[in-house]
Image (tube, rainbow, N blue to C red):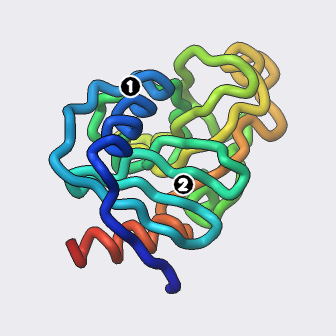
C-alpha cells in the first residue's frame, strides 16, 4: 500500500474541526495534533488518532467511518439487512430492497450505511433517491457506495493508525 503523511498546522486543524462541525454537524473537540495522509486518490485527515474527513480526488469531502461510529455526527443513514452486508463490504451500491430502516434525507445527501446487529456504520454513500422514495418504491439502487470498511482507503487508515 503506497501512501505518505505529514503533520498539519494548528490552522489546518481548526479548519478540519470547522468542516466536521459545519458540514457533518459533528460535535468534535479541538484536537491537539493531526496528520494528513495521501494515498489512493484521497487525502485522509486524522486528528488525535481519529480519522475525521476524507477528501476524494474530485475534492468531495466525506466523513470517515471511524468518525461516524463515535456517534457524534447526526448523519442521515440507512440500515441494511444482514444479507446485504457482504455485498456492501465488497463495494456494491445499496439496493432499496435490502434497506430495513431509514432516517430522513433527500436525494444527493451523504448517507451512512449501518449494519443491522450493532448498527455500526460500514459505509458512506450518496443517496440516489430520497428516504421517502426508498421506502415507497422499494426497488433499484438507493445509495451509491463511496467508501466502505475494507476498501483501499480503509486499509490505509488502519495501517496509519497502527503506526501512530
Q: Nearer the viewer, residue 129 or 5?
A: 5
Judge by depth and name the residue closer to the eye, 101 or 70. Answer: 70
Neighbourhood count class around disc 1 (C-alpha, 10 Å): few under 14, some 14–19, many 20 upward = some
Q: Nearer the viewer, residue 134 or 68?
A: 68
Q: Position of residue 59 (x, y in %)?
A: 66, 47
Q: In the rendered image, which quarter is residue 162 located in?
A: bottom left
Q: Is residue 3 above or below residue 89?
A: below
- The residue depicted at 58 percent of the width and 54 percent of the height is 147
Left or right position of 95 against 39: right
Q: Earlier in the sequence, mark 1 or mark 2?
A: 1
Q: Residue 57: x percent and y percent?
A: 68, 58
Q: Which residue is mark 1?
A: 21
Query: What residue is rendered at 35% in x and 77% in y?
Result: 159
Q: Residue 105 vs residue 64: left or right? A: right
Q: Quadrant of the C terminus?
A: bottom left
Note whether 52 is above or below 134 in the view shown.
Answer: below
**Residue 73 makes an appearance in the image:** yes
Q: Residue at x 27, y 45 (%)?
A: 10
| Residue beneath disc 2 | 85
Disc 2, SS: helix
Amino acid at each position: 500500500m503506497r501512501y505518505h503523511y505529514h503533520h498539519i498546522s494548528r490552522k489546518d486543524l481548526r479548519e478540519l474541526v470547522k468542516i466536521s462541525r459545519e458540514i457533518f454537524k459533528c460535535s468534535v473537540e479541538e484536537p491537539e495534533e493531526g496528520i494528513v495522509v495521501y494515498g489512493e486518490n484521497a487525502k485522509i485527515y486524522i486528528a488525535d488518532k481519529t480519522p475525521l474527513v476524507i477528501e476524494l480526488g474530485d475534492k468531495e469531502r466525506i466523513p470517515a467511518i471511524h468518525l461516524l461510529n463515535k456517534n457524534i455526527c447526526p448523519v442521515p443513514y440507512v440500515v441494511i439487512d444482514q444479507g446485504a452486508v457482504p455485498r456492501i463490504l465488497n463495494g456494491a451500491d445499496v439496493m432499496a430492497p435490502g434497506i430495513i430502516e431509514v432516517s430522513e434525507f433527500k436525494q444527493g445527501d451523504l448517507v451512512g450505511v449501518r449494519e443491522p446487529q450493532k448498527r455500526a456504520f460500514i459505509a458512506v454513500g450518496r443517496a440516489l433517491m430520497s428516504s421517502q422514495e426508498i421506502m415507497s418504491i422499494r426497488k433499484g439502487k438507493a445509495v451509491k457506495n463511496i467508501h466502505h470498511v475494507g476498501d483501499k482507503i480503509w486499509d490505509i487508515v488502519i495501517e496509519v493508525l497502527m503506526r501512530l
